[in-house]
Image (cartoon, coloured by chain):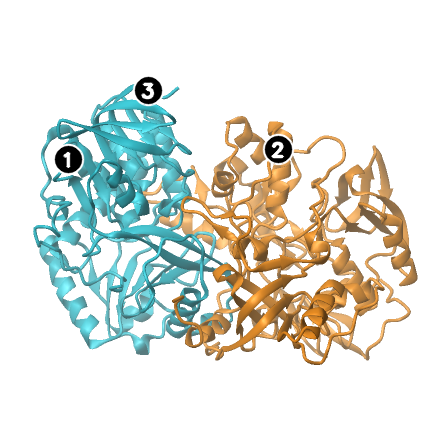
Chain colours: A cyan, B orange
């Protein structure tokens, strides 16, 4: 049976929906309902690069994701389940003068914000990334505390922790309507039932714009496909997560030994699809084989696509919607794995106490409308 | 083990794990080792169970050849003086102490070692523990730093009709389309195409000269509703992207082993692999072979007899309750009786590998599912026939492996089913089932069959198939970047 009335109805049972539910429960909120139209780990939360880092080139991103990184480090204890977040490090690799200059600026931001990062010299590149073609590297940042979190462990931990705290989580249950009464979001409909809610939170990944439209409001950005490949498993070859900044490419080696990576390619139109195509596989392969020349003979085991909601400045959209009270958003996630613990923490704080944390405030949902975009240069995204 | 009378090829010798092995020119390393009685080629990634040439689950058996790591033994032709050594074992394949990993209680480790409760992240020991798990989960060696394999420039061609499969129905489809004036490309693993049919003694229709044949190529993907086909040669050469007017899938069917303990022991072979050994290499699958199957199993036994292979037992696959043996097949248990044998060849249940057809005809916003009428694909021949059910004799045994690569047992599926978990995608994520070399065929068929038996509900659902399943290397894929742009 579906509850008739809840304190918070959360649309989306991925990383951000579950993180919010957990943090609300942790703050003592009772009657939390999470509804997801798909299956557990079926969306971007089960189809991602698993990468976690705290440092970016902008102050805003570095403050938010630095906080999130600290939460990742303590997350297994907090949830009571092993999230398998491995601090194998994270490296941003620059191959051009332009990106090398960005690396220098980013290092200054990290130093000012107290985030642990170092610039790697040539010897450092060889030590941290022995398999990389060091001749191609102009500059690199290494985050010793960054790393990767496999979703099957981390998502499982979040779900178990939510259920242990009394959160109701329903997969295969689509929200078909969001009611608004007196200028606020007041109820959701699912499985043919109306569920009263004191607050509604939307964390539906690529489907965020559609879900927001159910409540009669618009969101910045659009849903789009992102593709990745996995290379057949091999013994430990690459330790850190890696962003090849000039190639719009990211990769890491999983605990199983697969090298998982993806890239964005110029000229690709944003489209919603879970079907994979040939070009991204080919370009990812080319970037991997170019930067890690010994991998040329390694085999492509599989390829797949996921979908994300991309905002106009590639940053998350966090907070209450300016046009509808009690409609909260954790949307626009491209670095969603890295940001999930902080989004849940800070959004729960805002919902429960009304206080918008300084680290969250710059990511306000209406920043495009107010012409306050955040310029972040260290992500691996292309303008489309 | 004796070679069959028709075995041809000059005799030569090579080293396996430091011991001299006799072979014939034209043998793959795997066939030569099988002929010499070395059934175990590798050990499984996690619990280091013996694994051998099987035709099922494992797409590759990797070993070190003359110092080159990660060479596929089922592809590599043996040469005089080759020095072949097993990988992922210590100190050697027979004594392999890494199999002590089996002593780690299974409740601590799941899904290829990625789930563990023992040492949570954030604790001081976690990174070291994880490094050990990564080591244990290794299969291929790290490629040597001085091995630099450049991108292999890809090529792009177009055809009115692309036929995948060089057996009788693929050849007929190609000939028919060519006869109507269509340009036809035929992609086949075999050289010349139709190896399985030929080994089985079947006649092969001729291919018209106008058909472009990509022999020893694997069709690795059907993209854009089947209008873009990828094919890669097995020798590592240039991959080809084919713009296709339409696609004909004539991929035939593969036999699925019984879901019983011992089904992945070295010496359990599917019919394709056993016939290739006997016919192409003149190697008997065993001295006393048990042939199991569905349908006319006697006909299969007669074909082996015609190839001078000694068949000791013939029975239905569904009566098999267990395959016995320690490092290789020693017997088969059926109907409560044990029959001694040194190899088991399964010829059914027959099922079509669904990966390519699935990829070409799927859509959906929340989940990729096959959509009727979608995809530019016609399935012909036996591939179009309904799949036969996965079978086992007696009760469903907890020790049977649903997914040998990830060591997912029936017991693990049973525990999840008892906890109310019935979604195949979720079970895949919780167990790692289907994440190995076969990428789901046939292990997701086995998962579905086990789940149906355990829950009493029909399960005709499978997780998403995701080619290319190792059919091309990064160097081959890289070459396609120059020839295929984003979809308009």
Subunit under mark 3? A
Horizontal side of residue B247 vs A119, given as left or right: right
Subunit under mark 2? B
Q: Which label was assigned to residue B370?
A: none
Q: Do badges 2 and 3 share one subunit?
A: no
Q: Residue at x 40, y 37 (%)?
A: A156
Residue extending farthest front: B180
In the rendered image, which residue does mark 3 sit on? A3
In the rendered image, which residue does mark 2 sit on? B458
Q: Residue at x 54, y 37 (%)?
A: B106
For the residue carrying disc 2, how many other residues have a C-alpha within 10 Å: few (<14), some (14-19), or many (20+)? few
The local secondary structure at tag 1 comes to: loop
Give how far across and how far down residue B374 sits, in percent: 53, 53
Q: Image height check: is A17 above or below B87? A: above
Instruction: Tell me whether circle 1 and circle 2 mark residues in contact (CB < 8 Å).
Output: no
Q: Image height check: is B419 above or below B275? A: above
The local secondary structure at tag 2 comes to: loop
* Among the 4 quarters of the image, the one containing residue A176: top left
In the rendered image, which residue does mark 1 sit on? A324
């Amino acid at each position: 049976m579906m509850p008739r009335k809840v304190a918070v109805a959360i649309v989306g049972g991925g990383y951000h929906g579950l993180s919010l539910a957990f943090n609300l429960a942790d703050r003592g909120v009772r009657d939390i309902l999470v509804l997801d139209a798909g299956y557990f780990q079926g969306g971007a939360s089960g189809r991602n690069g698993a990468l976690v880092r705290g440092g970016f080139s902008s102050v805003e991103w570095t403050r938010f994701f630095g906080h999130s990184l600290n939460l990742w480090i303590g997350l297994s204890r907090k949830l009571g389940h092993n999230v398998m977040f491995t601090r194998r490090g994270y490296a941003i690799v620059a191959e051009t003068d332009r990106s090398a200059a960005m690396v220098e600026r980013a290092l200054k931001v990290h130093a000012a914000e107290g985030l642990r990062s170092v610039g790697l010299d040539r010897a450092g590149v060889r030590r941290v990334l022995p398999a990389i073609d060091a001749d191609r590297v102009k500059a690199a940042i290494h985050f010793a505390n960054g790393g990767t979190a496999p979703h099957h462990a981390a998502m499982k931990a979040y779900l178990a922790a939510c259920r242990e705290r009394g959160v109701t989580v329903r997969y295969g249950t689509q929200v078909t309507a969001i009611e608004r009464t007196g200028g606020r979001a007041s109820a959701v409909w699912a499985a043919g039932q109306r569920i009263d809610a004191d607050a509604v939170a939307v964390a539906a990944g690529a489907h965020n714009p559609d879900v927001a439209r159910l409540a009669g409001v618009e969101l910045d950005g659009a849903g789009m496909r992102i593709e990745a490949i996995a290379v057949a498993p091999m013994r430990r070859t690459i330790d850190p997560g890696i962003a090849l900044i000039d190639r719009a490419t990211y990769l890491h080696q999983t605990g199983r030994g697969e090298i998982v990576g993806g890239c964005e390619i110029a000229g690709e139109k944003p489209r919603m699809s879970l079907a994979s195509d040939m070009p991204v596989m080919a370009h990812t392969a080319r970037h991997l084989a170019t930067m890690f020349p010994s991998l040329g003979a390694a085999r492509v085991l599989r390829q797949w696509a996921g979908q994300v909601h991309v905002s106009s400045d590639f940053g998350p959209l966090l907070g209450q919607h300016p046009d509808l009270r009690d409609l909260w958003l954790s949307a626009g996630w491209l670095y969603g794995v890295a940001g999930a613990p902080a989004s849940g923490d800070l959004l729960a704080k805002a919902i429960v106490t009304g206080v918008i944390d300084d680290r969250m405030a710059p990511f306000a949902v209406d920043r495009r409308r107010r012409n306050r975009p955040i310029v972040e240069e260290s992500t691996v995204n292309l303008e489309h | 083990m004796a070679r069959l009378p028709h075995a041809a090829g000059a005799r030569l010798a090579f080293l396996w794990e430091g011991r001299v092995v006799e072979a014939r020119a034209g043998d793959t390393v795997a066939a030569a080792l099988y002929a010499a009685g070395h059934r175990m080629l590798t050990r499984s990634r996690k619990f280091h169970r013996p694994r051998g040439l099987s035709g099922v689950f494992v797409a590759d058996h990797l070993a070190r050849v003359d110092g080159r790591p990660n060479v596929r033994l089922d592809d590599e032709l043996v040469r005089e003086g080759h020095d072949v050594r097993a990988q992922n074992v210590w100190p050697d394949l027979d004594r392999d102490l890494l199999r002590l990993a089996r002593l780690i209680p299974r409740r601590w480790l799941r899904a290829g070692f990625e789930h563990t409760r023992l040492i949570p992240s954030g604790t001081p020991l976690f990174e070291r523990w994880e490094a050990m798990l990564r080591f244990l989960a290794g299969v291929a060696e790290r490629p040597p730093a001085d091995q630099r394999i450049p991108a292999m420039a890809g090529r792009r061609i177009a055809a009115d009709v692309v036929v995948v499969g060089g057996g009788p129905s693929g050849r007929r489809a190609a000939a028919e389309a060519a006869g109507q004036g269509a340009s036809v490309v035929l992609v086949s693993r075999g050289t010349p195409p139709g190896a399985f049919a030929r080994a089985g003694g079947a006649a092969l229709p001729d291919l018209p000269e106008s058909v472009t044949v990509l022999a020893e190529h694997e069709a690795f993907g059907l993209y854009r509703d089947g209008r873009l086909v990828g094919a890669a040669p097995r020798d590592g050469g240039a991959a080809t992207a084919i713009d296709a007017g339409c696609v004909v899938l004539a991929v035939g069917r593969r036999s699925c082993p019984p879901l019983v303990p011992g089904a992945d022991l070295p010496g359990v072979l599917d019919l394709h692999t056993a016939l290739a050994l006997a016919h192409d290499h003149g190697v008997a699958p065993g001295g006393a072979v048990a042939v199991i199957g569905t349908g006319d199993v006697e006909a299969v036994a007669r074909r082996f007899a015609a190839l001078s292979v000694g068949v000791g037992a013939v029975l239905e696959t569904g009566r098999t309750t267990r395959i016995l043996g320690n490092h290789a097949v020693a017997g088969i248990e059926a109907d409560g009786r044990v029959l001694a044998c040194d190899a088991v060849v399964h010829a059914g249940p027959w099922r079509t590998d669904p990966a390519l057809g699935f990829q070409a005809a799927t859509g959906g916003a929340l989940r990729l599912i096959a959509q009727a009428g979608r995809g530019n694909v016609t399935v012909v021949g036996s591939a179009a026939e309904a799949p036969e059910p996965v079978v086992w004799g007696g009760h469903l045994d907890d020790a049977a492996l649903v997914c040998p690569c990830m060591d997912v047992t029936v017991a693990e599926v049973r525990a999840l089913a008892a906890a109310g978990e019935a979604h195949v995608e979720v079970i895949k994520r919780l167990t790692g089932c289907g994440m190995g070399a076969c990428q789901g065929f046939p292990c997701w068929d086995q998962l579905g069959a086990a789940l149906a038996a355990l829950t009493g509900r029909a399960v005709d659902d499978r997780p998403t198939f995701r080619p290319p399943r190792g059919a091309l290397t990064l160097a081959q894929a890289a070459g396609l970047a120059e020839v295929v742009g984003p979809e308009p």
